[in-house]
Image (cartoon, rainbow, N blue to C red):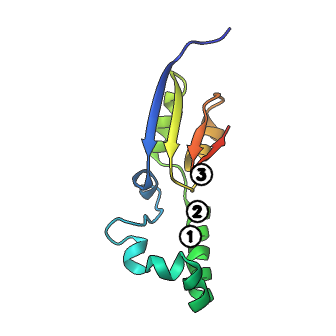
């Protein structure tokens, strides 16, 4: 039997991940206040200081390994019981997917940076 659930589209960004301890780029105290975009997110920055760029992305990876889904992610996963949830995000932390894997067995998809994941 196919359920006819109403569709729910959710737009999320860095704010939802901030609650999980993931530093945002633009917030007060965010990464762009500490680092120049040109220094860590450009080929010229790499040529000038590859250690800085490497350290920057290694720090991000460390944050990603430690971050856990928060109540916002849990609530969105819970909504999948009642709605066909489509999450549109630019986040690269996979916290929506992590929570979904533990809590849901729905056919919803997350759209992330132009890629579709099931």
The Cα atoms of the two marked residues, 1 and 3, are separated by 13 Å
Instruction: Reply above or below: 13 against 76.
Output: below
Provide the residue designation for mark 3: 94
- Determine which quarter of the picture holds residue 59: bottom right
The Cα atoms of the two marked residues, 3 and 2, are separated by 8 Å
Q: Nearer the viewer, residue 90 or 24?
A: 90
Tell me whether circle 2 and circle 1 mark residues in contact (CB < 8 Å): yes
Q: Position of residue 67 (x, y in %)?
A: 55, 59
User: What residue appears at the point 62 percent right and 32 percent down from the top-left corner?
Assistant: 104
Provide the residue designation for mark 2: 64
Q: Position of residue 73 (x, y in %)?
A: 49, 43
- Determine which quarter of the picture holds residue 4: top right
Name the side, left or right, on which 16 lies relative to 78: left
Provide the residue designation for mark 1: 60
User: What residue appears at the point 65 percent right and 40 percent down from the top-left corner?
Assistant: 101
- Residue positioned most to the bottom: 48
- Determine which quarter of the picture holds residue 118: top right
């Amino acid at each position: 039997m196919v359920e006819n659930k109403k569709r729910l589209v959710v737009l999320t960004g860095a704010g939802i991940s901030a609650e999980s301890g993931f530093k945002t780029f633009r917030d007060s105290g965010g990464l762009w206040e500490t680092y120049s975009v040109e220094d860590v997110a450009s080929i010229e920055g790499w040529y000038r200081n590859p250690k800085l760029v490497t350290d920057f992305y290694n720090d991000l990876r460390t944050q990603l390994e430690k971050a856990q889904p928060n109540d916002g992610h849990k609530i969105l996963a819970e909504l999948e019981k009642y709605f066909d949830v489509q999450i549109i995000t630019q986040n690269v932390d996979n916290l929506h997917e992590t929570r979904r894997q533990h809590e849901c067995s729905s056919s919803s998809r997350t759209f992330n940076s132009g890629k579709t994941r099931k």
